[in-house]
Amino acid sequence: MWQMKPLDPAFTVQQQFAERESGPVVLVNLFTLDPADEAAFMDAWKSDAVFMKARPVFISAQLHRAGPSPAYFNYAVWESLEAFRAAFSDAGFQAS
């Protein structure tokens, strides 16, 4: 099972969401998986990517694999912090 953690535990994702509007937002995630969870992770990432790419304020997303290891680096860009917040709080995303 994967778990999302902030890069800096002293500045949580929720605190980052509370920041003022500041222009484009880049989300970076590092996922280190158990090999048994890799297929489910890929299915979930693809589903989330399809949802996000349909949002008009979403700019791009890329997922990179660290060679043969089941470790992934996700890089996604939104036009603004407001757009980022809206995407993650959308009921359609919450259901996926």
Image (tube, rainbow, N blue to C red):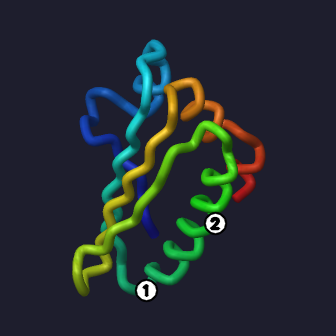
Q: Pinpoint residue 29: horizontal percent, then vertical percent.
A: 36, 53
Q: Nearer the viewer, residue 36 or 26?
A: 26
Between the C-alphas of marks 1 and 2, the distance is 19 Å
Residue 14 percent across, percent down from the top left: 47, 29
The crowding category of the residue bearing disc 1, from other C-alpha atoms within 10 Å (few below 14, some 14 to 19, many at least 20), is few
Q: Secondary structure at mark 1?
A: helix
Mark 1 or 2, nearer chain start: 1
Residue 27 falls in image quadrant: top left
Give the camera-side residue of 47 and 16. Answer: 47
Place of residue 25 in the rendered image (x, y in percent of width and height, measured from the top left): 42, 33
Of residues 21 and 33, the one nearer the viewer is: 21
Q: Quadrant of residue 16?
A: top left
Q: Secondary structure at mark 2?
A: helix
Residue at 42% in and 18% down: 22
**Residue 38 falls left or right of residue 88:** left
Side of 33 where 59 appears, left or right: right
Can you say which quadrant of the picture contains the C terminus? Answer: bottom right
What is the three-letter code of the residue carrying label 2? Ser
Residue that carries the numbered disc 1 in the rendered image: 36
Q: In screen coordinates, is 68 left or right of 86? A: left
Residue 47 badge: 2
Circle 1/circle 2 CB separation < 8 Å: no
Going by the numbered disc 1, the residue's amino acid type is Ala
Q: Position of residue 44 (x, y in %)?
A: 58, 68
Q: Is residue 59 above or below residue 36?
A: above
